[in-house]
Image (cartoon, rainbow, N blue to C red):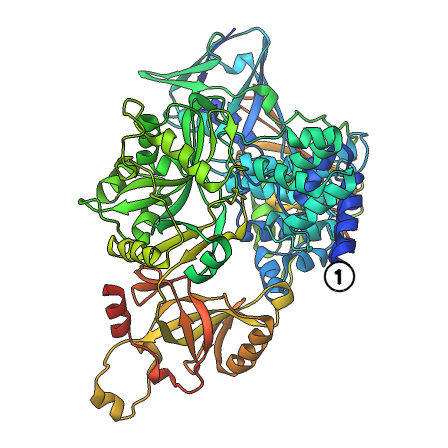
Amino acid sequence: MEFATFADRAATIEAEPADLEVVAHVRDLFADAGSDLEIVARFAQGRVFPAWDSTTLDIGPSACYDAIARAAGTNVSGDDVEARLAEVGEIGDVAANYEFGGQQGLGAFTGGSGGNGGDLTVREVHEALADIAAAEGSGSQDRKVDLLFGLFNRCSSEEARYLARIVLSEMRIGVGEGTVRDAIAEAFDVPTDRVERALQVSNDYGQVARIARDEGIEGLDAMELDVGRPVQAMLAQTGTVTDALEEWDEAAVEWKYDGARIQLHHDPSGLAESDGSTVETRVFSRNMEEVTDALPEVVEFAAAHLEEPAILDGEVVAIDEDGSPLPFQEVLKRFRRKHDVAKAREDVSVRPVFFDCLHVGGEDLLAEPLTTRHDRLRSVLVDADADADSVADDEIEGLSLLWQTGDPDEIESIAAEALEAGHEGIMLKNPDSTYSPGRRGKNWRKRKPDVETLDCVVTGAEWGEGRRATFLGTFELAVRAGDDSEERRSAGSAVEPQTLETVGKVATGITDEKLEELTDLLEPHITVAEGQEVELEPAVVFEVGYEEIQSSPTYSSGYALRFPRFVGVRSDKDPEDADSLERLERLHDQ
Amino acid sequence: MFKAIVSAETLTSALDSVSVLVDECKIHLEEDGLEIRAVDPANVGMVDLSLDAAAFESYEADGGLIGVDLSRLEDIAGMADSGQLIQLELDEETRKLHIQIDGLEYTLALIDPDSIRQEPDIPDLDLPAEVVLEGNDVNRSVTAADMVSDHIALGVDETEEYFYVDAEGDTDDVHLELTQDDLIDLQIGPAHSLFSLDYLKDMNKAIPKDTEVTLDLGEEFPVKIYFGFGEGQGQVTYMLAPRIQSD
C-alpha cells in the first residue's frame, strides 16, 4: 500500500465523528492493505512495533523537528518547527504546513524511476523506522535524523502529517484498541470475541489481523500465549468490601503490595533473544518493558523455584534488612536501573511476590477461574522436594496469600494485618473470574485507606495539545516554604514567589469544561511564556489528592506527590493560606 | 584472503571521507586495491572511493567483500601516530579483522555485508562546467555560506567567466566570485545548482585543504566533487543531489 493512500484514509478516519463509521473506514483500510496488513494495523494506532515489543524509535521530539526542518526547505530550523508547534499545538498540522521534496535524490539522475525513488510505500516507511530504531552507538542520533529526513523529503504534506504523528507516538485519529478489534472482525468476517481473545494472548494487532484474514477463526483460536512475550496485565479498579460481597457472595482477598507490577516469563529450556542467544528468564513491567537486567533477584528466584515453563503475575517489593517492605519509591530506584545494578542491589534489595499464573507447562490458564489459577501457582512455587499438601501457604516463598471469605469482619482483619505489615491495603477479587489481560474490570478491586488532600499554589502550567491547544493543563504545584510563624502571618505579609517550593504537576482528574474554566482563571496570571510552558504568579490554590508523598530530587521542595489528582479550586484560599512545606514533611514522615 | 600494511595517515583519510556520509560500509578487497561505494540513508549524497594497491606498503587480496563499522575502525586507526604503519589481516574463519599497530593488537568483528545498505548506482553525468580549485577555497566557500544559510548555490557565470558561490539567509547574504586567476582551472559551461550545506559541510571536512579539488557542475544537476589522497594513489568522488530551487 502506498503511504499516500494510508494518509488519505487516516484523514478520512480522523474527520469521522461517528464510532460505527470509524470502524467501517478502518475495516476497509484493513481489507485493502494486502501484504502490508500487519504494518497498517499498527500504524492505524500509531504504533510501529507490536505492543509486546519494547523496541522504540528512541528519537526525541527535537530530532524529529530537525528532520522536518531539513526536509521543509531552505533556512527552516528545528527551532522554527518548535515555534510553530507552540502556536499550532499539534505536530501533524505543523508538518502538513510545509512543502517537502525540494531536496532531490541521486536516484533521479541514474535513469531510475521517480525523483526520490518513487512514491513512498507503507512498507518503506516501516523499514526506515525500523532502521531508525536499530541505529545505536556513537553518532546514531545524527543517523536517525538523516533517515527521518529522507522519509520526510519523500512525503507530501498529508503524508508528513501522519508520519510526524507516528514518529512522535501522537497518532490520535480516534482509532483505539476496540476499534481495531471490531474492524478486524468486520473486515475478515470473524467473531469479535475470538479476535479479542487472540489480541489478549498475542498482544500484536498486526499479527491478529493477518491471521484473521489468512487463517480465519481456526487460526485465531490456535493462537496461544508465548512464553517470553509479555501480555498486558489485568488491572483493578477501586472498590469497597460491601459492593464486592454483594456481587460475588464470597471474595478472594489478597494483600495489596506497595511494589511494582512484574510479569515473569520463564522457560528452563531457554527463551530466544533477538540476537539469537537464549535466556531462561525475562521480566517485564506492567507497560511490558523488559526489566530483566534490573532485577537479578527475580531471575535468581525463577532459577531456584521454577522447573517448567511458566508466566507469573506479581509485584516486586523493596525490603529492608529485616524483610519489612520499604516504600514504593525504593522499588522504583531499582526498577529503572540500567547500570551498576549490583551496587543498587546492595542499597535496596527486592523480592518478588506472585499472585497469579497465566501459563504453566505448555498450558494457558487465562480461561480458568482465579481459584484454580492460584492453586496452580501454589503448585508451581512449592518446593518440589516437600510434601506439597502439608506445607502451609505462608511458608511457600514468593506466593501471595489468598483468603476466600464472605465475612466482612474477616476481610477487615486481613486489611488491618496488611496495613500493619506495611502494605497498601487489600485486593478483592472475584474467585470465579478469568484473567483478562489489559482489562480494568470489576473482577479485581483495590481498596486503600483514604488519604488527605493538600492545598497547593499553582505556579506554572503548559498549553495543551491538539483539541486542548487553547487550554492550560499540566499545572505545576507548590507549597509554602520558609518562615511559617504566627507573627509573620498575623503581620499580613504577602508570600514572595521564592518562598514557594514545587511538589509536582497535576494533569489528571480534569474535564475539558473544567480546563476551560481553569484557563480563564489562570491566564491573567501568566508572567512568563516560553514555548508551551508558562509561569504563573502565585494567585490560585488547588486542592489536590494524592496517594503518597515521596522524597524526590525532581521538585524544589525535595518531595513529590505520587499520583496527584485535581480535586477542586480553593477560591476561599489565597496563596498564603496554602499548605506549608512543614506540613508536607509531617505527612511524609507519618 | 586479505593482508595489507598501510600508513595510518592514508587509512585515516580513506575512512574519514566515507564516514562523513555513512556509519557502516562494504569494502571490496580487490586484487589491485580497495573500493568503497556508499550512499547516505536519504539517497542524497554518495561517495566512491578507490585506494590503489600501490598506496600500501604491502598489499595482498583476492576479491573479497567485508562490512565494517566505520567509527570503530576509525577509533582504532586513531590509536596510531601519523608516521606509524597499520597492519590489517582478515581471518576468513572467524570473519574478523586483525589490526596491528606495533605491539597493539585489535580484533574487529565485521558486519554482515548483506545487512548494510545497498551500494548506489553511480549516476553517469555529463556535466558541462568544471572548476578546479584548492581544498582551501572549497572550505572558505562552505564556511562563508554556512554563516547565513543552510543551503549554497554553486554556479558559473558564462559571460564574465567566473565561478561563484551564493548563499541567501533570512536577513544576510553571501556572494563569492573566483575568476580564472583565483582558480587552478575553469571550464566554462551553463551551471547553477542549489545544495544542502548539511551534506556539503560534512564532505568538506574530508577534503584536504592543500589538495587540488575538481567540481563538475550543471544546471539543476548533482555536483561531482573529486580529489586525490594518499600521494595520488587514492581517489575520492562525492556526488551530491541538488535541491530544486522553488523561486
Quarter of the rendering containing residue B25: top right
Q: Position of residue A184 (x, y in %)?
A: 72, 41
Q: Quadrant of the N terminus of chain A?
A: top right
Seen from the viewer's position, the closer of residues A375 and A320 is: A375
Say above or below: A511 vs A390.
below
Q: Secondary structure at mark 1?
A: loop
Residue at x 70%, y 53% (from the top left corner): A161
Residue type for callout 1: Pro
Relative to B238, is A13 above or below? below
Q: Is residue A71 left or right of residue A66?
A: right
Residue A541 visible within the image? yes
Residue visible at 54% across and 12% down in the picture: B54
Q: Is residue A541 left or right of residue A101?
A: left
Quarter of the image that includes the C terminus of chain A: bottom left
- Viewer-proximal residue, B61 or B83? B61
Between A195 and A275, the one nearer to me in the picture: A195
- Farthest-out residue, bottom: A491
**Which residue does the numbered mark 1 point to in the structure image?**
A17
Asked whether residue B153 appears in the rendered view, the answer is no
